[in-house]
Image: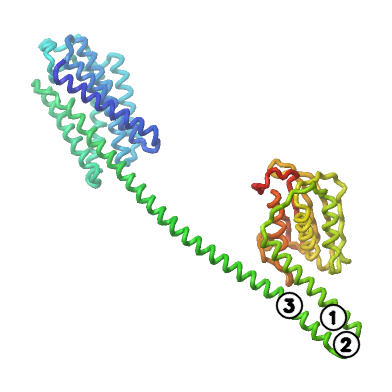
Amino acid sequence: MSWTAAAMFAWSGIFAFVGVYYAALYIMRREHAEYVSFAGLCGGLCVYSASTAFTIDAVSPADSTFAQCMQHVGVMPATAFFVDFVLRLTEEEHPRIRAAAMGNAGLGVCAVLAGLFFDPAHADPAYDWGRGELTNRAIAEMSAVGMTFVGLGVLFASYGVIVLFRTARGRRDLRGAALLTGVALAGGAWDVLARLLDITPINFSSHAALLPVLGFSYVLVGRFTQIDRQLEDRTQELARSYDYLRVTQQALVKKEQLAAVGELSAVIAHEVRNPLAIIKNAVSGLRRKELRPEDGETLLGILDEETDRLNRLINDLLAYARPISPERGEPVDVRRLVMHAVELAAGGSRDISHIEIELELDNEVDPVEGDEALLRHALINIVDNALQAMPLGGTLTVSCRNTDIDGRPCVAVDFHDTGEGMDTIVRSRARDPFFTTRQTGTGLGLAIVDRVARAHGGLVELESRHGQGTRVSFLVPRDRSSMAPPTS
């Protein structure tokens, strides 16, 4: 093997390595289409360089013609991939030129394989076979078909070079690759001139093809480095943003805590001041010497009522503040629990003679595993809210049914009142603690109900429209094997 053939095999190995590397890189990063184009360019040059080595050491016209055919099998796709790679690298949008270059390469390879490029019968008789030195003589005469495809390939490659040089004027990272491509282009022009002058120097284009590949590899490696720097900068920026958000979140949480404390203080102050004022006036009335017995009974009744009011306030605050941990016990009979809760809520000191309560508990419902005291307290709050929503009278309908939550069997208790209802804004805030539209009350009733339901793995559904009443559905799973709240 001659030294020039050995060199061409070495270049072929380099092209193969680079092509496989960037093909694998494209598989990992599909968004970078220029990688597969560059891998195709290197693959074509690999075939071209290996075929050139065989051409150099050819010992017969048939071997030389076959090797020259394989040269064009490599160089035709390499030309098309070169155009595609340059257009993608420079971010030029020329889909028709890209498609035309690929089409010319595909048809050219088919023509080569069909034997339409060369005629082995026209081998140069003056060529010294086995000399081991590549010359620029036409070993086999190229046909008109071959010249057409090669000419079109040269045009497409020239267009790619023009785009590369034009873009390199404004992009410093492409200047080195453009310069090396120009050197390879000059070597190819010299080889064409040498062939026309029928002189036999070393074929420079076969060796100079390595220069653009090295230049483009440098560009792609530079882009890798730039991307790594950008990722590092973004990571640092995200870290700074995270620290800022953490500090901001802590400040917001602190402000929310202060706001909640302020709101709670205002609610407690308002709810406590009024009963205290009434109690003070009642005590002052009881101290009058001329107090009649019937007036004393009235004032004592006022003291009892306002004391109960303060006691309910304290109970609501404690119920909302303390952690809710349902205790396991015997299965709870839901219908009996509902009747007991309604009886307790309706048996208070308020007058509900103008409200009709209908219990539709004929359906058979399954027992649930839960804390009976917590469930009863939640149902009492719902009934109490419904009764307060009908100051002018109405009907409260209570029913039970078996249903499911996220595929888990559960029991639902529905409360439907014909009261004033809620508009969209009030309905969206109904579960918020300390939110109330009434003159009296802490706004903790429905918030406690929601916490009790979620502590049992259930939920509270609320349907209401202004002037059309309200429906509250209290849903609790039958089995407490999973206490996670539902996703809905």
Give above or below for 330 relative to 98. Answer: below
Q: Amino acid at mark 3?
A: Asn
Q: Tell me residue 24's x, y (percent).
A: 36, 31
SS for dot 1: helix
Q: Quadrant of residue 285?
A: bottom right
Q: Which badge, 3 or 1, comes first in the chain's sequence?
A: 3
Q: Are marks 3 and 1 in contact (CB under 8 Å)?
A: no
Question: Which labelled disc corresponds to residue 291?
Answer: 2
Q: Which is nearer the eye, 73 or 27? A: 27
Q: Which residue is mark 3?
A: 274
- Residue found at the far right of this picture: 293
Q: Is residue 121 left or right of residue 392?
A: left
Q: Which is nearer the eye, 420 or 161? A: 420
**Alpha-carbon span between mark 3 and mark 2:** 24 Å
Crowding at dot 2, Cα within 10 Å, few <14 / some 14-19 / many 20+, comes out as few
Figure quadrant of the N terminus:
top left
Q: Which badge, 3 or 2, comes first in the chain's sequence?
A: 3
Q: Tell me residue 373's x, y (percent).
A: 77, 56
Q: Amino acid at mark 1?
A: Leu
SS for dot 2: loop
**Alpha-carbon span between mark 3 and mark 1:** 16 Å
SS for dot 3: helix
Q: Is residue 433 left or right of residue 207?
A: right
Crowding at dot 3, Cα within 10 Å, few <14 / some 14-19 / many 20+, comes out as some
Q: Tell me residue 443's x, y (percent).
A: 70, 65
Depth check, mark 3 against mark 1: the one in front is: 1
Give above or below for 159 relative to 5. Answer: below
Q: Which is nearer the eye, 248 or 111? A: 248
Question: Which labelled disc corresponds to residue 299?
Answer: 1
